[in-house]
Amino acid sequence: MMNFRILAVAAVVGATLAGCVDTTSGGYAVDSYDRNVTIANQTGRTVYRFYGSNVGTSSWEEDILGSNVLGPYSSVNINFNDGTGHCNFDFKIEFADGGTYTDYDINVCQITTYTIR
């Protein structure tokens, strides 16, 4: 009888803990850092492509804007949580007129806005 009670309690505890598994991370880094950054375009030019690659990579990742653009004096919120735990990212900006701008080692865990000037 005593073994049955122990097994029953263990089953209840196991079922309860199974419900506590974090299913919200979706492969993203789970830490206390907020990697959401508002990208503010304070130029008179349209941003055609925006790349943000963590400093641990040796190439530019995909264009974050995708099929969208960032118009003059507009802003967009970007979540830089790529699942690696990195806080520092390099940014590459390509303008519709063909110009480019690159900025390195931006700590997205410490800033809330990045302004393109």
Image (cartoon, helix red, strand yellow):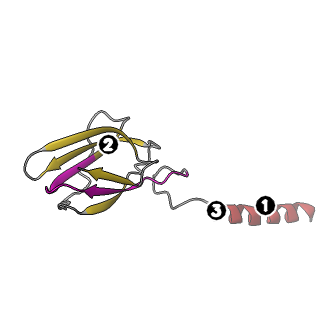
Q: Does the segment drawn in magenta span residue 40?
A: yes
Which amino acid is tagged 2? Ser
State how far apart marks 2 and 1 are (Cα): 46 Å
Tag 1 residue? 10
Which amino acid is tagged 1? Ala
Pointer 1 and pointer 3: residues touching (CB < 8 Å)?
no
Please tell me which residue lies in front, 2 or 108.
108
Q: Nearer the viewer, mark 1 or mark 3?
A: 3
Residue 33, given in percent of the width and then of the height, sits at: 51, 51
Label 2 crowd bin: few (<14), some (14–19), many (20+), radius 10 Å: many
Tag 2 residue? 53
Relative placement, left or right, of 115 versus 4 is left
Please tell me which residue lies in front, 72 or 19.
72
Numbered badge on residue 40: none
Q: Secondary structure at mark 2?
A: strand
Check the image and name the residue furthest to the left.
97
Relative placement, left or right, of 61 versus 5 is left
Q: Secondary structure at mark 1?
A: helix
Please tell me which residue lies in front, 94 or 21.
94
Residue at image position (27%, 62%) is 75
Q: Tell me: residue 42, above or below residue 58.
A: below
Q: Quadrant of the rendered structure where residue 5 is?
A: bottom right
Residue 13, given in percent of the width and then of the height, sits at: 75, 63
Which amino acid is tagged 3? Cys
- Of the numbered discs 2 and 1, the one sitting upstream in the chain is 1
State how far apart marks 1 and 3 are (Cα): 16 Å
Q: Quadrant of the rendered structure where residue 88 is?
A: top left
Q: Quadrant of the rendered structure where residue 69 is?
A: bottom left
Numbered badge on residue 20: 3
Residue at image position (20%, 60%) is 70
Residues in magenta?
A: 32-51
